[in-house]
Image (cartoon, rainbow, N blue to C red):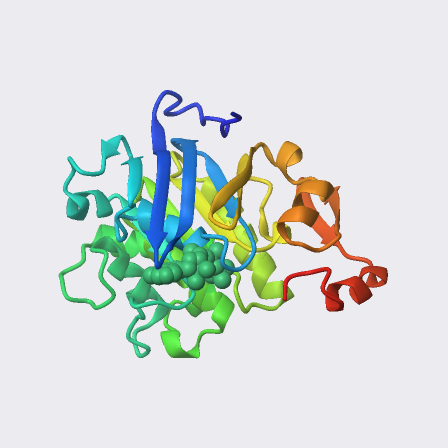
């Protein structure tokens, strides 16, 4: 099995290891036989269509869902023998919408600064170092002009970049990005991808797991891709070996051609295929 390239800083350690992980719900396996190893410091992607199990796997990795079977280790700690609360201090999950919605009246800088303690309200004192780090990260993600802008006035793309800056304030060792480009227009999407790429180029970067439906949304930093299909691993390995037209046509049940340019990947679907998509050739 192919594994993602290790970064030189921590070449020997695995950020994530799952063995035979399965989640059984309502009479079926929504994840099954998931074996996955992610070296520390790598930027990896989990790719798959709707319902393939991406969010379920994310919840397992972040310790919010206990698998029915299998072993999970995150940041070298085996689930079952680690205090998950302590472990979560070292990881951050970023989602466009979620339970952890910031107070809309807080400024971008205040929201980013709350990353110092992992909650979304300014419930604790922050240090000048936390604020300086939040400001630096907001500049890194291209929000230097929006430091004093209320969160509610930020665009969707700016909000997600603000949340990514927030997630980085305390230098997490694992950063989970769950469909960060969902609902964004082209410019906002590209700004988020540029942000992922630049955060990965920070000194001693966290391991990044990017969850997405679309191969267009993989920045060149991604060194390993796992493709999920119906809760199973359809393929995993380096992007070039995994992002193949035949494989993805099968996974997405749509005849597509994968095009590669400048370290990125794109899917092309010919209008000639549309008739078959509407006549039972694709998912109902
Ligand atoms: N608690 C549950 N009980 C039963 N089925 C569930 C439960 N949670 C998720 N599922 C099902 O498991 C499958 C995988 O769901 P999941 O949300 O992990 O997929 P996904 O790849 O993240 O999908 P999407 O891209 O649409 O967000 C789906 O068919 C979903 O309906």
Tell me what residue is drawn at x 23 percent, y 54 percent: 116
Q: Single out the residue that lies furthest toward the right.
A: 272
Q: Is residue 178 above or below residue 91?
A: below
Residue 42, horizontal then vertical, whole percent: 45, 34
Q: Quick one: 230 or 13, which is closer to the camera?
A: 230
Q: Is residue 215 left or right of residue 98?
A: right
Res. 161 in view = no
Residue 188, horizontal then vertical, whole percent: 57, 64
Q: Single out the residue that lies furthest toward the front.
A: 27
Q: Quick one: 143 or 75, which is closer to the camera?
A: 75
Q: Is residue 139 left or right of residue 266?
A: left
Q: Single out the residue that lies furthest toward the top.
A: 12
Tell me what residue is drawn at x 40 percent, y 49 percent: 29
Residue 174, horizontal then vertical, whole percent: 34, 42
Tell me what residue is drawn at x 38 percent, y 57 percent: 94
Placement of the C terminus among the 4 image quadrants: bottom right
The quarter of the picture showing ligand 1: bottom left
Q: Is residue 192 above or below residue 196?
A: below
Name the image quarter holding residue 199. Answer: top left
Q: Quick one: 224 or 56, which is closer to the camera?
A: 56
Name the image quarter holding residue 149. Answer: bottom left
Res. 30 in view = yes
Tell me what residue is drawn at x 65 percent, y 40 percent: 243
- How many numbered dots are placed on residues in this image? 0
Q: Quick one: 273 or 151, which is closer to the camera?
A: 273
């Amino acid at each position: 099995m192919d594994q993602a390239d290790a970064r030189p800083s921590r070449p020997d350690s695995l950020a994530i290891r799952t063995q035979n992980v399965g989640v059984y719900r309502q009479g079926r396996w929504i994840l099954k036989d998931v074996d996955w190893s992610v070296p520390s410091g790598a930027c990896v992607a989990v790719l798959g269509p709707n319902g393939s199990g991406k969010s379920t796997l994310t919840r397992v990795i972040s310790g919010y869902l206990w698998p029915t079977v299998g072993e999970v280790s995150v940041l070298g700690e085996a689930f079952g023998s680690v205090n998950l609360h302590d472990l979560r201090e070292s990881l951050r999950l970023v989602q466009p919408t979620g339970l952890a919605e910031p107070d809309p009246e807080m400024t971008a800088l205040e929201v980013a600064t709350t990353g110092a303690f992992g909650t979304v309200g300014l419930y604790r004192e922050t240090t000048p170092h936390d604020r300086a780090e939040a400001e630096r990260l907001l500049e890194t993600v291209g929000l230097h002009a929006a430091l004093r802008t209320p969160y509610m006035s930020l665009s969707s793309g700016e909000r997600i970049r603000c949340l990514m800056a927030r997630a980085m304030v305390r230098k997490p060792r694992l950063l989970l990005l769950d469909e960060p480009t969902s609902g964004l227009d082209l410019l906002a999407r590209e700004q988020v991808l540029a942000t992922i790429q630049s955060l990965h180029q920070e000194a001693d970067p966290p391991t990044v797991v990017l969850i997405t439906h679309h191969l267009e949304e993989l920045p060149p930093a991604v060194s390993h891709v796992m493709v999920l299909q119906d809760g199973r691993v359809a393929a995993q390995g380096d992007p070039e070996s995994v992002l193949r037209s035949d494989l993805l046509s099968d996974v997405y049940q749509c005849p597509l051609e994968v095009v590669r340019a400048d370290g990125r990947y794109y899917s092309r679907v010919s209008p000639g295929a549309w008739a078959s998509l509407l006549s039972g050739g694709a998912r109902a």
